[in-house]
Image: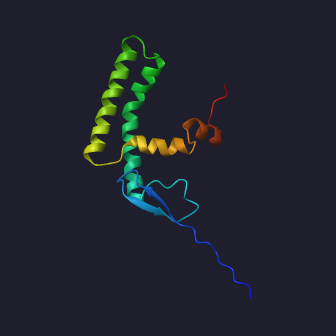
Amino acid sequence: MEHTTQARKVPEKRACCECGKGFDITDPHRQHSKRFCCDAHAQAFANRQTTRGKVMAAATLAWRGKRGGGEVGKAALAELCAMADQFNDEDRKAKRPPVADYFASLAGQGYRFVDRQRRSGNAKAA
């Protein structure tokens, strides 16, 4: 009689990008994308990023459009830095993990906005 055993996959440990607490990823289909311990934390993070992105968008585009030069480019960069400092301070006070950790997890998996645009067919041809 032959005896076979199936190896049990050990859950991957990860830290929630919203609260910093560790959680296990047991669903192999979500292993690469799961970054939050619960849906409420994923939604809170997404809402905050959307709100912050909206206020930073005009300054980012102005800064990049002027290549950082001239009065407008310099003012836009100063505004961006002030907003980033404020948002980072808010996260520290709320004891949230640094957004840099979230960005590093995306970059570590090769995830970039430009790639997402290519996959969706929304990228402009050069």
Name the foreground residue: 77 vs 28: 28
**For this view, does 108 lie left or right of residue 123?**
left
| Quadrant in which the C terminus appears | top right
Q: How far across and down, in percent of the image, does residue 42 sit? A: 42, 53
Colour scheme used in the picture? rainbow
Question: Residue at point 34% right, 27% down?
Answer: 81
- In the displayed structure, 1 sits above or below 41; it is below
- In the displayed structure, 9 sits above or below 18; it is below
Q: Residue furthest left?
A: 93
Q: Residue furthest bottom?
A: 1
| Quarter where residue 37 is shown | bottom left
| Quarter where residue 119 is shown | top right
Count of number-bearing discs: 0
Name the foreground residue: 41 vs 105: 105
Name the foreground residue: 59 vs 82: 82
- In the displayed structure, 118 sits above or below 81; it is below
Question: Residue at point 47% right, 42% down?
Answer: 104
**For this view, does 46 lie left or right of residue 113?**
left
Q: How far across and down, in percent of the image, does residue 2 sit? A: 73, 84
Q: How far across and down, in percent of the image, does residue 43 sit? A: 40, 53
| Quarter where residue 123 is shown | top right
Question: Residue at point 38% right, 55% down?
Answer: 41
Q: Residue furthest right?
A: 1
Question: Residue at point 36% right, 53% down?
Answer: 20
Q: How far across and down, in percent of the image, does residue 1 sit? A: 74, 89
- In the displayed structure, 97 sits above or below 24; it is above
